[in-house]
Amino acid sequence: MLLPNILLTGTPGVGKTTLGKELASGSGLKYINVGDLAQEGQLYDGYDEEYDCPILDEDRVVDELENQMSKGGVIVDYHGCDFFPEHWFHIVFVLQADNSVLYKRLETRGYNEKKLKDNIQCEIFQVLYEEALASYKEEIVHQLPSNKPEDPEDNINQILKWIEQWVKDHSS
C-alpha cells in the first residue's frame, strides 16, 4: 500500500515532536525527528557558539533520509524545511503557537535570551510558514494551531482524516 510522506515544521517549542509521535502511533507511519537523527549519526558541520548548538549538515541529512523517503509512509519533524527535496512530501504542516505560550515553553527548555528572542521573532514574522510556502506548492502547505491542550488531538484527528483520504485517492 502506498503511504504519504508528511513534514511537520515550525518554530522550536510549537509541539512538532509531541504531534509527530502521536501521529505515528495513530497512523502506523514512521516518525523521524531530524534533530535526533543528526545526533545519532553526528550529521553536523560545526558548532554555533552564539546559539549554543551544533550546525546541521543538511546534505548529509538528505542523503541519510533518501531511501526511507522514497518508500513513503514517513513523518519528518524539523524546524527548517527549505533543504528537503520538494518531491519528498505530499503535505506540509506548519505548527504555530501564540507568542506568550511559546515563550513559556522555550523558557522552560532553558533557552538563552538571544535564542529565546530570535525564536519568538521567528514566530511573530511567520518565518517558517513563509519558508514552507517558498519551498513547496502552496496547496500542500497548511497551518495548525498549537496553543490549547486540545489542539494536538484536534490536529491528529484532522491529519488522520487527510491520510485516510490520501490513501483512498492513491490506491489502484
Image (cartoon, rainbow, N blue to C red):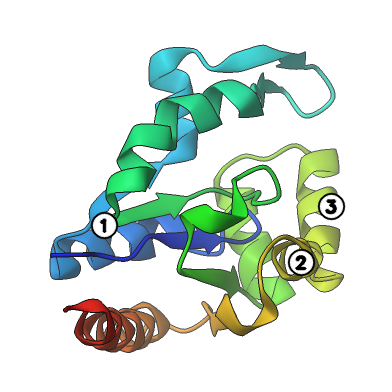
The percent coordinates of residue 74 (x first, y second) are 31, 53
| Between discs 1 and 2, the one toward the N terminus | 1
Quadrant of the drawing holding the N terminus: bottom left
Q: CA distance from mark 1 to mark 2?
A: 29 Å
User: To which quarter of the image does residue 143 belong?
Assistant: bottom right
Residue displayed at 73% across by 72% down: 99
Q: Nearer the viewer, mark 2 or mark 3?
A: 2
Left or right: residue 156 compared with residue 139: left
Left or right: residue 87 compared with residue 98: left
Q: What residue sits right under mark 2 in the picture?
A: 123
Compared with 167, 64 (above or below) is above
The percent coordinates of residue 73 (x first, y second) are 26, 57
Q: What residue sits right under mark 3 in the picture?
A: 117
Compared with 74, 40 (above or below) is above
Q: Nearer the viewer, residue 101 or 75?
A: 75
Q: Nearer the viewer, residue 54 or 1?
A: 1
Q: What residue sits right under mark 1 in the picture?
A: 73
Compared with 148, 127 (above or below) is above
Q: Nearer the viewer, mark 1 or mark 2?
A: 1
Q: Secondary structure at mark 1?
A: loop
Q: Secondary structure at mark 2?
A: helix
Compared with 138, 20 (above or below) is above
Residue displayed at 21% across by 84% down: 164
The 10 Å Cα crowd at callout 1, few under 14, some 14 to 19, many 20 or more, is many
Does residue 142 show up?
A: no
Q: Secondary structure at mark 3?
A: helix
Q: Amino acid at mark 3?
A: Lys
Q: Amino acid at mark 2?
A: Glu
